[in-house]
């Protein structure tokens, strides 16, 4: 594969991930403003990409608990 294809593929994958992230962040922001009495329970997950790098993200569940 040549470098041009790799760069284009990487760019589009990054664009898709960014778009999904923006959609999720807007959805969570709208949900949070509805009811402030509800608490969120968050769990953080760590993804090991390889030996040297990892990505951490958290998922939150809302509800009365």
Image (cartoon, rainbow, N blue to C red):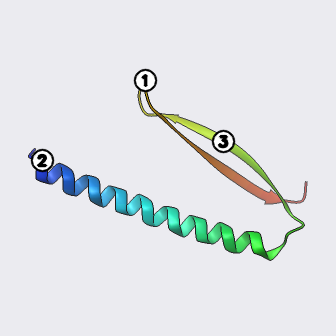
Residue at the spot x=79%, y=76% of the render? 34
Tell me the number on the disc at residue 65: none
Q: Earlier in the sequence, mark 2 or mark 3?
A: 2
Disc 1 to disc 3: CB gap under 8 Å:
no
Give the image location of residue 40, x and y in percent.
80, 56
Residue underneath mark 1: 51
Question: Element under label 1?
Answer: loop
Q: Is residue 4 above or below residue 55?
A: below
Residue drawn at 72 percent across, 71 percent down? 31
Residue 12: which quarter of the image? bottom left
Q: CA distance from mark 2 to mark 1?
A: 25 Å
The quadrant in which residue 61 appears is bottom right
Q: Residues within 10 Å of mark 3 (few under 14, many from 20)?
A: few
Q: CA distance from mark 1 to mark 3?
A: 19 Å
Compare marks 1 and 3 and give the one earlier in the sequence: 3
The label on residue 3 is 2
Q: The N terminus lies in which quarter of the figure? A: top left
Q: Residues within 10 Å of mark 2 (few under 14, many from 20)?
A: few
Measured as percent of width and height from the top left, residue 58 is found at 64, 47
For residue 44, the mark is: 3
Q: Earlier in the sequence, mark 2 or mark 1?
A: 2
User: Is the residue under label 3 in contact with that under label 2 (CB below 8 Å)?
Assistant: no
Circle 2: element type: helix
Instruction: Find residue 21 and report its horizontal and vertical position in percent.
Output: 51, 61
Query: Quick check: 38 left or right of 45?
Result: right
The residues tagged by marks 2 and 3 sit, at their Cα atoms, a distance apart of: 35 Å
Image location (x, y in percent) of residue 23: 53, 69
């Amino acid at each position: 594969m040549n470098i041009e294809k790799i760069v284009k593929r990487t760019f589009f994958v990054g664009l898709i991930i960014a778009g999904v992230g923006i959609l999720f962040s807007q959805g969570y922001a709208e949900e949070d403003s509805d009811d402030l009495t509800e608490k969120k329970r968050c769990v953080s997950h760590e993804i090991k990409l390889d030996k040297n790098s990892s990505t951490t993200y958290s998922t939150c569940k809302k509800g009365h608990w």
